[in-house]
Structure formats: C-alpha cells, structure tokens
Image (cartoon, grey):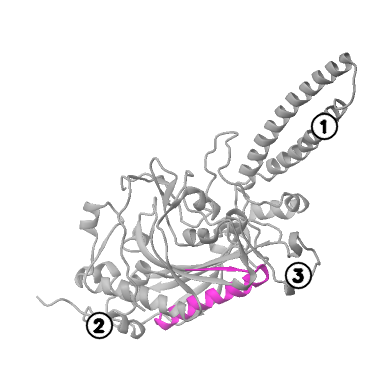
C-alpha cells in the first residue's frame, strides 16, 4: 500500500505494544536507587511492533499463553490478513503446521497409552509363563515408545507456543490499514497560539529561566538524561499531583508501582525485553528489567487470578518513573526533553468485562482529552493505523499536541484497548455473576466458567512532553512563562515562571 504502508554505555532490551486475536492531592514522589549494572540493547520506538527476539531452536518457553488454536485455524484467512496489515513477521503457516502435527501426535500418544493400559489389564489374569513374558516385553516396548512420544509432544508444544506468541492481536474493523501516515484524525481541539514575537523552543526557554541542565546530566549519566531545576521541579510535581487528583475523581484507584519487574511479566504484557530492537533496559545476570511504562507492573497486579465479577471494572491510575533506551532517536525533532531515557508518568489502566472494553476505551480517551483541554493545549486525536498498533492493541488512539518551538505536533499520550491479549498471557480471568450467564453452561460447583478480562491502558501525563507543551505554548514576550490556572494551586499559587534576578 504505497504511501500508507507504513550513547550511553548501558546495555539494553525492547518494549513493543502487541495484541492477540483471541476469541472473542499530594503524594510523595521519590526516585529509588538503581540496582546492579544495567545493560542496554539497541531499540526502536517504544510501542511499535518489533522483530522477534532470537530464540534457541526448541527452547522451552518460560510461560504459556492460553491461545485458542482452533479459532486461529478456523479463521486462517482473517488472521493472515491481520498479520499482513500489521506488518508483523509472525509465521502463521508454521504455527498451523505445528498445531496439526501436535494434534496428530497427541492422537498417537493416546493410542499407544491405550495399548499399554490394555496390556497391563491382560497381565492381571492367570497367564501361561510364555504369554506373561511376551506381555512383559510388549509392555516394556510400549512404555519406552510412549515416553519418547510424550517427550516429542512436549517439545512440539513448546515450539508451537513460542511461535504462536508472536501472532499479534486482531484489529478493530474501523482501524485504518497501513503505516503511521494512514492514521486518521478523530478530533481536533483548539487552535495554535499566535505570537507577536520570535518563538523560542523549550531548550532556550529552559536555559534562560534556569530550568534544566542537560550538560551536567550528560557528564553524570550520559546523553538523553537531564536535571530539572527550580520551577521545573515544581511544575513536574504539580502536573503529577493535579493529574492524579483529576483521574481519581473519575473513580480510579491510585497506585505507585515497582519500577523493576520480571522479564516474563514484560513479555506477557506484549513487549520483548530481549529482542534485537528493544526499548527496555534489562539488568545483567537477572531475569529483571526496568519498566518503560507503568502498564507493565499494573498489568501484572492481578496475574494468575480469578476476579469476582462484582469487582469489575478495576480502574487504576499509577505513578511511576519510566526508563527507555530511545536508541536511534537522535535529531532535531527529538531534542531536549522530547525523547529521554528516564521520565515520570501517570498511567491509567482498566480491567473490565469483555463487552465493556470499547466503552472504557472511549472513556479513557475522553479523560485524556479533558485533561489536555483543561490546560488549554491545541491537540488532535488520531485513530492509529494498523502498522502502528504494536502487537497487543486491538485499537489505539494517540493524542498529539502543538509544540510551537518545535513547529510541529508531538505525541503526548495514547490509549489502547488490548481486549484479552494480555489477560490470556497474564492469566487474569473473572467469574461472571449468575445474571450474566445466558448459555446455561456451568462448571464445577454450579458456577459460571471463568472468562478472560479485557485490559486497557492510557497515558494521563508524560511529564517531559507536557513541560515542553506548557513552556512553548505559554511563553511571553519578556521571556517568562505563564502557569495554566489548574496547576497553580499545586505550585503554591505560583502563576508565572520569570527570569531570575541577577
């Protein structure tokens, strides 16, 4: 589809955003010290579909997703088209070949197991010595043959699971097909501010107002790190606390999260921590990573559990620091605070019933739009095209705000509906109440069988890019910057960031 196809000495690992097509007021903010040495691999954009991590042939997966292979096989053409539309490198033909092979082998295992049991039953009766000896030999041969078949079946199942976990989620029918350029505008809010003076970018404003120090951070930590100073620190705290208070008004439970998680949890959320292209820092000699988003630890909060129907929806708003490699992100378009290795973020996350996820996706994007409108930003909401979804997202809305100093729109948030892609990997289910059961199907104890929840995530505030927006949009001719009114109570009543007196 032409036109619409789509430095630091740290050692790294990746963050994708993938999705499966399965059947259907003040808070303390303190940075924890980093643990052992961190290794950075190369990376590409954080929430993009990345290439498969190199796997040892026949390597045993560390965890298994509950994949509906029959559904995949019955909907082969739709799944194949979805893989093409997402520009994924998943090998559907290999998955189906392995599934058929495993199905055949399973039947053979059952047949041999039946023969072995039959021989064992025959030996319970009175037998001639020669007949007993013959049955003993036959049973021994069957036992050895069965052990070999079962070993082969385990390896085949592991191989199948490894390949199938790379298949992306199915895609909402309204999602535009193609690359990022094919994304469609869902909403445009406000208009770009007009200035009667030469506009400065956030780097120049930050230097003149003594708000950042990139040079010292580069000496201490490396490029793409920064110190916030003076009013910029207050602005970060104000953004975090104001955003938390606004989202909590909508019924979200506040969280702070671990910022180091197991690699397996990263993978279950749809990211690839040890792929060739990665955004995640992995910790040497451990199975742990630094988080690139609070989506990962919040997603793991209810891992391997069956939730009560009465608890749903579970809505969380989480504060965390985020760490991303941002390899290959050099250039004028990503200078300053736009792409950095460490930043603060407020993330929304919802666990809900399957039939409710589209409703909550709309709710999440509405909350984002309300927050950015309250700050007086000019922004557009995009329905992202298929190649830009990453593996977990069924549908994703991005918000891009106007940044006058950069003279372009820049992404400040996204909201994704992942349906049951993550919950099938994380093992998160719920048991429907009696009123919801319409099929009459019951499980043990006369209870409705558990179903996988749907998960959604959305960025409420990514601090560095919000600081860019506020500094550049609210700059004044005298070099000062006006603080938007909603943030002033969270900055001790400060209304203007002015030049420091000499």
Neighbours of disc 2 within 10 Å: few (<14), some (14-19), many (20+) = some
Say if residue 119 shows up in the picture.
Answer: yes
The answer to which quarter of the image holds residue 155 is top right
Q: Earlier in the sequence, mark 3 or mark 2?
A: 3
The residue singled out by tag 1 in the image is 117
Secondary structure, magenta segment, majority class: helix
Q: CB atoms at circles 3 and 2 under 8 Å apart? A: no
Q: Is residue 299 above or below residue 279?
A: below
Say if residue 312 shows up in the picture.
Answer: no
Residue name at image x 54 percent, y 38 percent = 55
- Classify mark 2: helix, strand or loop: strand
- Classify mark 1: helix, strand or loop: helix
Q: CA distance from mark 1 to mark 3?
A: 40 Å
Estimate the x, y position of residue 387 in percent, counting from the top left: 57, 57
Q: Is residue 370 magenta?
A: yes
Q: CA distance from mark 1 to mark 2?
A: 84 Å
Could you tell me which quadrant the N terminus lies in? Answer: bottom right
- Magenta residues span 348-377
Q: Is residue 15 magenta?
A: no
The residue singled out by tag 2 in the image is 496
Residue reaching furthest to the top? 130
Residue name at image x 35 percent, y 62 percent = 343
Tell which of 335 and 498 is nearer to you.
498
The residue singled out by tag 3 in the image is 437
Q: Is residue 271 left or right of residue 135?
A: left
Q: Earlier in the sequence, mark 1 or mark 2?
A: 1
Estimate the x, y position of residue 353 in percent, counting from the top left: 64, 69
Q: CA distance from mark 3 to mark 2?
A: 57 Å
Q: Earlier in the sequence, mark 1 or mark 3?
A: 1
Residue name at image x 33 percent, y 60 percent = 335
């Amino acid at each position: 589809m032409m036109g619409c196809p789509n430095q630091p000495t740290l050692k790294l690992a990746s963050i994708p955003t993938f999705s499966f097509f399965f059947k259907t007021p003040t808070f303390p903010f303190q940075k924890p010290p980093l643990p052992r040495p961190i290794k950075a691999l190369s990376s590409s954009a954080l929430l993009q579909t990345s290439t498969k991590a190199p796997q040892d042939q026949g390597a045993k997966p560390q965890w298994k997703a509950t994949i509906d292979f029959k559904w995949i096989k019955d909907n082969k053409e739709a799944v194949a088209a979805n893989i093409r539309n997402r520009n994924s490198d998943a090998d559907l033909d290999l998955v189906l070949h392995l599934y058929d092979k495993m199905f055949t082998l399973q039947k053979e295992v059952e047949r041999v197991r039946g023969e072995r049991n039959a021989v064992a039953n025959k030996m319970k009766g009175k037998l001639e010595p020669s007949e007993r000896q013959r049955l003993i030999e036959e049973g021994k041969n069957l036992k050895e043959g069965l052990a070999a078949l079962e070993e082969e079946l385990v390896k085949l199942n592991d191989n199948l699971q490894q390949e199938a976990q790379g298949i992306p989620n199915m895609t909402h029918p309204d999602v535009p097909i193609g690359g990022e350029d094919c994304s469609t505008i869902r909403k445009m809010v406000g208009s770009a501010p007009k200035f009667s003076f030469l506009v400065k970018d956030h780097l120049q404003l930050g230097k003149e107002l003594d708000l950042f120090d990139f040079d010292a951070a580069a000496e201490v930590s490396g490029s793409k790190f920064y110190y916030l100073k003076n009013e910029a620190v207050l602005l970060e705290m104000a953004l975090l606390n104001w955003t938390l208070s606004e989202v909590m008004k909508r019924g979200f439970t506040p969280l702070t999260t671990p910022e180091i998680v197991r690699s397996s949890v990263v993978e279950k959320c749809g990211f690839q921590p040890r792929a060739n292209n990665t955004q995640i820092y992995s910790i040497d000699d451990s199975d742990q990573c630094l988080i690139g988003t609070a989506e990962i630890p919040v997603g793991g909060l209810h891992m391997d559990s069956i939730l009560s129907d009465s608890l749903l929806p579970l809505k969380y708003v989480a504060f965390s620091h985020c760490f991303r490699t941002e390899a290959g992100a050099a250039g004028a378009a990503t200078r300053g605070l736009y792409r950095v290795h460490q930043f603060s973020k407020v993330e929304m996350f919802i666990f809900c019933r399957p039939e409710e996820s589209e409703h909550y996706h709309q709710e999440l994007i509405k909350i984002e739009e309300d927050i950015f409108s309250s700050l007086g930003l000019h922004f557009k909401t995009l329905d992202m095209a298929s190649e830009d979804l990453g593996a977990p997202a069924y549908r994703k809305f991005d918000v891009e705000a106007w940044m006058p100093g950069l003279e372009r729109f820049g992404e400040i948030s996204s909201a994704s509906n992942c349906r049951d892609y993550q919950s099938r990997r994380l093992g998160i289910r719920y048991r429907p109440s009696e009123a919801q059961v319409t099929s009459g199907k019951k499980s043990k104890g006369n209870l409705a069988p558990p179903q996988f929840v749907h998960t959604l995530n959305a960025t409420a505030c990514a601090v560095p890019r919000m600081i860019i927006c506020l500094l550049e949009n609210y700059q004044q001719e005298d070099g000062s910057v006006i603080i938007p009114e909603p943030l002033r109570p969270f900055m001790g009543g400060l209304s203007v960031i002015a030049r420091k007196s000499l």
